[in-house]
Amino acid sequence: MRLPHINGFIAAAVFVATLTGIALATPYESSVLDEDHLMSAVQVESFDKLSEELLRKTGISMAASLLDDLRSRDARTYARQSAEEWKTLSQADGAIMILLALKQRRSIVEAAGTASQVLSGKEIERIQQQKLFPAFRQTKYGEGVLAFAYAVATEIAREKGVTLEVDAPNVSEEAPMTVRGWIFIFAVFATLLLLRYLRPKKERHLSRGDFGGGGRW
């Protein structure tokens, strides 16, 4: 089941945006609007499949809007209105909207329709703390959004008593340090020690204290 791409819905959304004086953060070509290309094509495709499966099994759709700048708009109101619009556009009983504003470093998740009855704000906050925020702090936006979306969808499916036929997101982990890597680090460290030892004693004396004090990194 594909999400609807009907010109009438888009025209209605534009009309509503004109009346309210804001452009809502609603994706049309897929369930993801990504202004700064923070998610890869594979991640967007995975998100779309998850949203479609969730809609098919539970009547609840999910969307993500990754914006560069909210400007002067209120983030909470903006996310709430976007969630309501996405519920209408996807012809769903409920909707989950994941909103990210990069410049403001804000992420807000809003539930509309039946989604707000199935998933409480407290539960959404818990999943954000576990899946979304840790990834965002490492600038792994795509991985964070996908991991969060899968956790939310799984929780909704559990509450609805259904099973989602989608694979868990493949969240990459940092590769462990190889033997060659440790050898390289040791060689660099030994070289720095040797260079310091070969410096004249006067220069070595003057260089003491270079690492004192604090600062931002």
Image: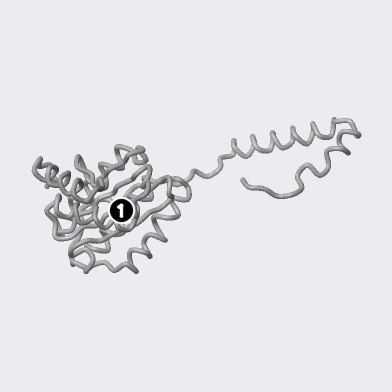
Residue 4's image quarter? top left
Is the residue 126 above or below the residue 172 in the image? below
Q: Which colour scheme is used?
A: one colour
Residue 15: percent from the left, percent from the top?
Answer: 15, 45
- Mark 1 lies on residue: 98
Residue 95 in the image: state x and y as whole percent: 21, 57
Q: Is residue 68 left or right of residue 196?
A: left
Q: In the drawing, does residue 199 fall left or right of residue 182?
A: right
Tell me if 106 is positioned left or right of 160 in this view.
right
Q: Nearer the viewer, residue 158 or 55?
A: 55
Residue located at (29% from left, 54% from top):
78
Q: Quadrant of residue 199?
A: top right
Residue 17 position (above or below residue 77): above
- Residue 79 position in % (x across, y down): 29, 55
- Label 1 amino acid? Ile
Looking at the rendering, in which quadrant would you find the C terminus? top right
Tally the numbered discs. 1
Dot 1 alpha-carbon crowd within 10 angstroms: few under 14, some 14 to 19, many 20 or more: many
Q: Which residue lies furthest to the right in this view?
A: 202
Using the rendered view, name the quadrant where residue 102 is placed.
top left
Q: Is mark 1 on a helix, strand or loop?
A: strand
Along the viewing direction, whichever of 135 and 189 lies nearer the viewer: 135
User: In the image, what residue occupies the spot 48% across and 48% down?
Assistant: 138
Q: Is residue 112 left or right of residue 215?
A: left
Q: Which residue is drawn at 68% across and 38% down?
A: 186
> Is 124 situated above or below 22?
below
